[in-house]
Image (cartoon, rainbow, N blue to C red):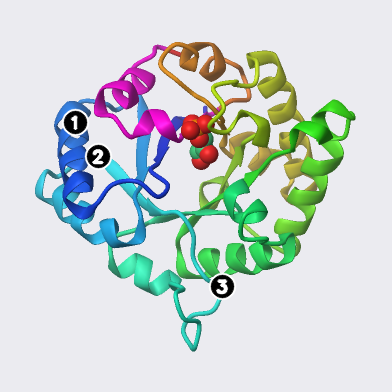
Amino acid sequence: MRKKLIAGNWKMHKTVNEAQILARQLADRLSDVNFADIAIFPSFVDLYPVNVIIREKESNIHLGAQNMHPESNGAYTGEISADMLISAGATMVILGHSERRHIFLETDSFINRKVKTALSTGLVPILCIGELLEERKSGKTEQVLEKQINGSLKDVKINTADKLIIAYEPVWAIGTGENATPEQAQQAHKFVRELLAKHWGEDIAQNLRILYGGSVKPNNAQSLLSQPDVDGALVGGASLDADSFEKIIRSGY
Ligand code: 13P
């Protein structure tokens, strides 16, 4: 049985003070939640201050970062390493988010290097994949997902399903208010799970979590999260407010 994971990607929002306030609210409100895993992904500068709150409150919330560089150190101005993230309290890292792919032109092979680095340091990568609207309209969704999965996971070895998480985030659904229908999400997730079985075998694929992301809100969370292959949500906008994030977590899937 795959335990659901509800993850909040705060993107480029929240100052240190604002991030600490939100982290405190979430830790207080969600301390009883054991039916799902919860994770939050603040900006780099907010990681450590948020980690202080989480530890103070002995919270069940996991902490992760939104990106990282594949090298362990060196002359990469403006970048951040896996060890730095770990030292700030992160145990997970989002890799290959569509905003990284499309705005910052990250390629599958660059993302592949990051996935390998994350795994070798013990960070759990949340690998994001997803098609553009034109690609969906021209019937290329599966082809795009297959290319992203095969490219980003090339020669990646895992021995258990808890080492890595996938997030299916159709680009046309991100920040648009237009979520994928539960049927569209289920179809894509099932396809991705079949691809993962080719990489690592049926057993790992059946236990690996595939999250859905793209305009997840309190009013659509239940219908998306109750799909058999949807193992959680990667929430953007609605994770910035304690009330709406809590409603999604408690939406009864
Ligand atoms: P929204 O929930 O704001 O559409 O963002 C989704 C996302 O990109 C999460 O990583």
Q: Between 103 and 186, which is closer to the camera in this rendering? A: 103
Residue 238 covered by magenta stretch: yes
**Residue 157 figure quarter:** bottom right
Q: Amino acid at mark 2?
A: Asn
Q: Is residue 59 above or below residue 65?
A: above
- Locate residue 185 relative to residue 49 in the image: left or right: right
Residue 230: x and y in percent read 58, 25
Q: Secondary structure at mark 2?
A: loop
Disc 3 crowd, CA 10 A, few/some/many (<14, 14-19, 20+): some
State the SS at label 3: loop
Q: CA distance from mark 1 to mark 2?
A: 6 Å
70 falls in the magenta region: no
Q: Nearer the viewer, mark 3 or mark 2?
A: 3
Q: Count the marks: how many?
A: 3
Circles 1 and 2: CB atoms closer than 8 Å: yes
Give the percent coordinates (x, y) of residue 155. Answer: 74, 65
Residue at image location 29% in from the left, 23% down from the top: 246
Residue sitting at x 67%, y 67%: 110
Q: Which residue is mark 2?
A: 60
Asked if one can make out residue 2 in the rendered structure from this viewpoint, the answer is: no
Q: Tell me if mark 2 has few (under 14), some (14-19) or many (20+) residues whose alpha carbon lies within 10 angstroms of its own.
A: some
Find disc 1 in the rendering and name its residue: 31
Q: Which quadrant of the structure image shows residue 172?
A: top right
| Residue 70: assigned label | 3
Give how far across and how far down residue 203 sits, in percent: 67, 40
